[in-house]
Amino acid sequence: MNKSKTGAGSDDRLILARTRRDRIREGVTVITKGEGVRVFDQDGKSYIDLVAGVTRPVHVGYGRKEIAQAAYDQMCELPYFTPMEFANLPAMKLADALSEITPGRINQFFFVCDGSEAVESAIKLARHHHHNKGDKKRYKIISRRGAYHGTTVGALGILGTVLPMRQIMEPLSSGTIFVESPYCYRCPFRLSYPHCDLLCAKDIERIIQFEDPEQISAFIGEPIQQGFGAYAPPKEYWKVVREICDRYGILLIVDEVICGFGRTGKWFGIEHYDVQPDLITMAKGISSGYLPLGAVGCTDEVMEPIETFHHLHTYANHPVSCAAALKNIEIIKRENLVENSSKMGTYFLEGLKSLEAHPTVGEVRGTGLWTAIDFTVNKKTRAPFPPNRIIHIIERAKKKGLIIKTMGQALEFAPPLIIQKEEIDEALKILDQCITEEEKK
């Protein structure tokens, strides 16, 4: 390993995901410690983590010894047993705990290792449901352009973003139908809300009719989309989608992998829209990243016709991960972190709105502690900002002790739910400086 202050280098044996070789040759940062909302690198430099581990799972912050203790105790008691033909107490208790907080009638659960596996499992549950009802023709899945649902093969098949991770693996299995997303800032139909009459939602019915309703198994979507940078749809959108799914016997899968467990100021993102999903997928905040865990939840109606769920992951219903998740949910409840997400999210969004004075800041948006700045080179036409310029802002921020990320044409922010005003103020000051410096350049 390269021992220079730049961290891991080209002679390191660790393969890094989605990291260019030239970046690795330059030397990547090694994160060695986390405490609260801050992480520290190999040189002891401190960063405010404004994206909760970059992939956004660390809801309760770093350094929670009681989660580590819960995992240790469970390892000593029972580290593993199969999810097939046998149950274990932590998984059973976690299913009970989730049934109390998940939306409406979602009350049956299957645990996996991450969000991609949760999405795969939800797709398989939907297929099992229809197959056992005698609707064996229903295999197609409706996804949305701009959607992100994971990187396993089934999840890639419904990936609505043109990325190398999808292109390299093509051809993928057939059966995915893509419809437009509710991205009002850059509407794919070149309309404006509310005069558009929610065409992005209502057009789904036309696509269904073209594809044959009797062949469609499920519609999947994130309640608030990450692909454009924390983009919430118009308030009526999900009700229209729910009505269309009901009309044609299509199951509604809501992907809560990012939105779940307080990220948007409610336990689950779909609660902002008062809609009942048939299935939901979960991960990230379910364990705050302390151990790998994902889950799919569904209603009794989904499970009722299924005699046997023909599906298996070795580490499904893992007792240690479930024990860690139980303690994590206990902390979220005890410290009112869902409420703090709503409160601090409002404060953070107000601060970000002040940055709209910058000529390159097109739109600031957010729900709870999931916010974004959409950049543009022209506020009137909303022409996209060059991606390399957004990368420059991220690099500037890192040098100043702030970790942020890009998503679509936007900078996206999703800090641990424990963040307070002082840390938000410090982050806003750095963001203002970085945008100003890049605009001058």
Image (tube, rainbow, N blue to C red):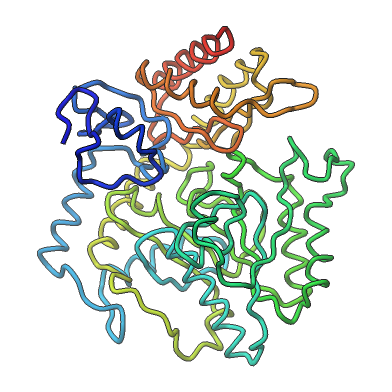
Residue 367: x percent and y percent?
58, 38
Q: Residue at 44%, 19% (x, y): give it.
A: 427
Is 135 above or below relative to 340? below
Image quarter where the N terminus lies is top left
Q: Residue at 54%, 79% (x, y): give it.
A: 300
Residue 283: x percent and y percent?
42, 56
Q: Residue furthest top?
A: 440
Residue 145 vs residue 279, the one in the foreground: 145
Q: Quadrant of residue 43?
A: top left
Number of numbered discs present?
0
Is 440 above or below relative to 328? above
Residue 33 vs residue 307, the one in the foreground: 33
Is 392 above or below relative to 284? above
Image quarter where the C terminus lies is top right
Q: Residue at 25%, 36% (x, y): give it.
A: 10
Q: Residue at 82%, 50% (x, y): give it.
A: 198
Residue 412 vs residue 365, the one in the foreground: 412
Residue 15: x percent and y percent?
28, 47
422 left or right, relative to 169: left
278 left or right, relative to 114: right
Residue 290: x percent and y percent?
27, 49
Is 324 above or below relative to 253? above
